[in-house]
Amino acid sequence: MRLRGLSIKKRVTLYYSLALILISLLIFSGFCFTMHYQVKAVSEETIKSAVLDSFENIECSDNIIEINSDFDIYEEGVTLLVYGDEGNLIKGSVPRDFPFYTPLSSDEYKTIGEDDKTWLVYDLYMLYENGQGLWVRGIYAMSTTEKTVISLIAVMFAALPFIVLLAVIVGIVITRRAFKPIGEITKTADSISGGSDLSKRLPQGQIKDELYYLTETLNLMMERLEKSFNAEKRFSSDVSHELKTPISVILTECEYMLQKEREGEEYRESLRIIQSQCGKIMTLIGRLLKLSRTINTAETLEKEEIDLSGLCWGICGELEAYAEENGTELIADIDEGITVTADETLTMRMIINLVTNGIKYRRKDSKHPWVKLSLKKGMPVTVTVTDNGIGIGGEHLKNIFNRFYEIDGAEKDPQVSSGLGLAMVKWIADAHGWKVGAESSPGKGSEFTVIL
Ligand code: ADP
């Protein structure tokens, strides 16, 4: 039989029963072995002490050996016989069936007889002052004691199959009870994988055992899967929605122009519209690729000790020309010598996105638009990007970190806007365990803070 084909439940019961049979056999054999030796040792002790004691009732005075009346021929189950030097029986009577001519040998244990009738024999020779000697023989009928032991062992072996049967039944009941939650978990997991409802969770028992922690881990895993599945779903629907708008503009424009012959200027105007919509699509695709790259890198953050002050100065230098092109002053308020453990490329992308937003969303009518990048020492270190731009209405503030969230009415260039910049900032901050927040008042300016 191939064990691998058996269910865990059956295998556990089988191993458990086999182990039990083995343990029982071991205990029983150990018991028999000990019993056998114990009985032998006790019998030897009894017979020897009976023989030794008997010599106390044999005296030698005036050259005559005398066995006094206290001599007991049967003591503690031991039959005592007294023999003379020539092996002639002086006192006591040989038990029935005991081989009469069993030779005498001093201070030696002998087992005489077989099967039904077994005796343990012990002889001791004593030489007295008058030159005469005496043998005392002790005979102990082993058969009775051994029979008791044998019958006890037989009872034990007879009971063994019942004990094993009982153990198997108990084993089946225990494993069935222990594996019941697994059945329920499998049923729920089946219904989750069969249906489309990812919000279902595996049932978690009350007792905090291995299964409890396993289901907890699986539930956490499912929660993460559900979240990423929903995020993917939302992302795809957002992307298709964002792409749909410029593509439908292009399609409508084409259909309109192809309806009949048009003037040259009309064609040019239509091509300009199509070009601008294509530009929008290109920007969107470019941003999406950047975001997906950011997310992929964020999964394997390459954290190291970075010089944040130096990084901020570098960003200011890099964006100075862009700020100047847009008539915006870039102010740096950077504390020196600040280092943090972070992914350098992602941290740089996060700060660049915030500063370029400050430049992009300046007030066109402002005489002196400015953006300030501050890096402040402390516990914790904070990066703040402040501007005196168009600001953000309170109703939008809570949504600006969502993907594709753009504020209608904000003067912006479709070529550089996609509603993904702040989503990326939030993503990077989350991946590092940083907090990002925004405060703003429309027409006055905004302040974005990242707490490291
Ligand atoms: P976008 O690519 O459109 O800039 P973002 O995710 O960076 O996307 O920003 C989302 C929206 O939040 C922008 O469309 C803009 O309306 C608003 N916004 C972001 N930063 C600022 C800012 N500094 N000042 C005013 N509005 C801003």
Image (spheres, grey):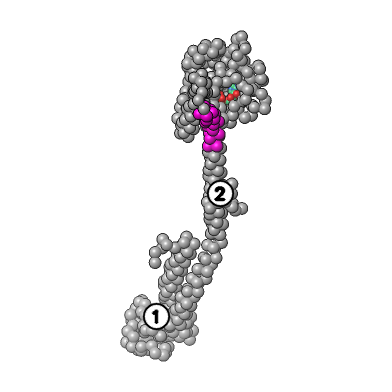
Reading the image, the residue beneath label 1 is 120
Q: Determine the residue positioned at 59% across, 29% down.
A: 405
Q: How many marks can you see?
A: 2
Q: In this view, does 351 lie to the left or right of 33?
A: right
Is ligand 1 within 8 Å of the beta carbon of the residue shown at mark 1? no
Magenta stretch containing residue 247, yes or no? Answer: yes
Q: Determine the residue positioned at 42% across, 88% down.
A: 95
Q: How crowded is mark 1: few (under 14 residues within 10 Å), some or many (20 or more)?
A: many
Q: In this view, does 6 lie to the left or right of 216?
A: left
Give 286 or 209, whichever is nearer the viewer: 286
Q: Is residue 272 left or right of residue 87?
A: right
Look at the numbered disc 1 and give the secondary structure of its residue: strand
Q: Determine the residue positioned at 47% across, 74% down.
A: 161
Give 175 or 425, whichever is nearer the viewer: 425
Amino acid carrying mark 2 in the image = Ser
Q: Magenta segment, which residues?
A: 236-259
Mark nearer the viewer, 2 or 1: 2
Reading the image, the residue beneath label 2 is 196
Q: State the image quarter where residue 393 is shown.
A: top right
Q: Which of marks 2 and 1 is nearer the N terminus?
A: 1
Magenta stretch containing residue 154, yes or no? Answer: no
Q: Residue furthest top?
A: 367
Reply above or below: 301 against 366.
below
Please state, as top left, top right, bottom left or bottom right, where the N terminus lies in the image.
bottom left
Q: Residue furthest front?
A: 261
Could you say where residue 205 lies in the image, as x and y percent from the top left? 60, 53
Amino acid carrying mark 1 in the image = Leu
Q: Determine the residue positioned at 63% across, 22% down.
A: 409
State whether residue 134 appears in this view: no
State whether residue 393 appears in this view: yes
Give 390 or 189, whichever is nearer the viewer: 390
